[in-house]
Amino acid sequence: MSDPYSVLGVSRTASEDDVRKAFRKLAKKHHPDLNPGDKAAEAKFKEISQANDILSDKDKRRRFDAGEIDGTGAEVPPRGFYRDQAGGPGGFKYQRGGGHESFVDMGDVFSEMFGQRGGRKRRGFGFGGERPDFGEDGFDMGGMPVTYSLTVPFLVGARGGKQRVDLPDGRTLDIDVPEGTMDGTTLRLKGQGMPGSKGMPAGDAYVEIRVQPHAFFEPRDNDIHVELPVTLTEAVLGGKVKVPTIGGAVMLNVPAGSNTGTSLRLKGRGLLDRKSGQRGDQYVKLKVVLPEKPDDKLKAFLQSWDEGKALDPRASMEQFT
């Protein structure tokens, strides 16, 4: 199994910022949108996304370091204890409950479910909540919950949409991903868990959504940041340029005399906050790009441009040397 530290090329003492920078550098290099048709790049992107999923989450990183989970996030069973974990397509993971099997991080889920269920309640269920009512034969009558992990493209999480998945038990399930779904969001699917016994209803399914990084959209809370290349002419003279947003391309006015690092805001073009119903903003950071081979006229102008020769953009750095 791959070691996430090795995959991202960071040490085991790497900070959260080191992990983030390493991941973004590799993601930009291997993102499928930038390498269309390259299966090797696609596989590498999945590998680094999985490694980042482990190391960017404090609890998962701690559990990996402790040997409780492996490089895919699957639990490492203790000696002599059986866990059934079947992998589905597209990184879709499936964990079943019941019998000699267990759940991943289901303490809060059990507390919520069993705290709301009617009937006799007894302590000591082992998940930090209360024990549900049992039938005369000593077995829980209701269906057990299951947990899944589903990876979706960034724009599906941002815009919302349906995702069809094939479950390990042969069923096909259409999941409605709500608009503004963030990485780590858990969706509850009522009645999609394990079937109940003796006519009791099925349990629920809990789907943890993992959102893939985008080639150039970088979410920060509900805001989106993007670096936009502009030509020297556009930066110096200004003008309108087309900018991609999650809702489609819009025209942005670049002020004359803009420079690399100039940040412009597109109000209300960020991600939807599902709690408040408000949208974040999109921040566009300009990056002036020169032609690969400047023509003779541009070279001649710069050679005769005395004010340009007198400009020292590094003057402010001298105080630190």
Image (cartoon, grey):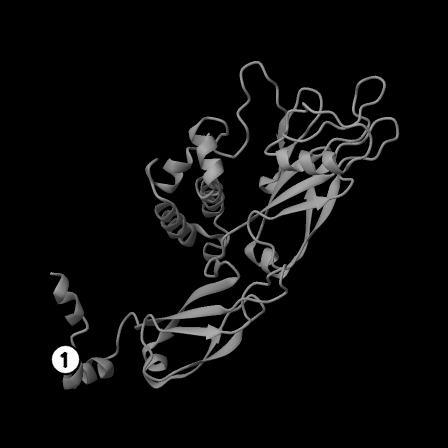
Estimate the x, y position of residue 11 in percent, counting from the top left.
32, 37
Estimate the x, y position of residue 167 in percent, counting from the top left.
70, 37
Residue 125 to residue 51: above or below: above
Estimate the x, y position of residue 78 in percent, counting from the top left.
54, 19
Q: Residue at x 51, y 34 (%)?
A: 72
Q: Which residue is drawn at 45% across and 40% down?
A: 58
Relative placement, left or right, of 107 versus 212 is right
Residue matched to label 1: 309
Q: In which quarter of the image is residue 247?
A: bottom right
Estimate the x, y position of residue 306 in percent, counting from the top left.
14, 85
**Who is closer to the viewer here, 214 or 204?**
204
Q: Is residue 53 visible?
A: yes
Residue 202 to residue 225: above or below: above
Q: Count the numbered circles shown.
A: 1
**Who is closer to the viewer here, 78 or 171?**
78
Q: Which quarter of the rendering shows the C terminus?
A: bottom left
Q: Which residue is drawn at 72% across and 27% down?
A: 131
Q: Quadrant of residue 300?
A: bottom left
Residue that extends furthest to the top in the rendered view of this protein: 80
Amino acid at the residue labelled 1: Lys
**Who is closer to the viewer here, 84 or 127?**
127
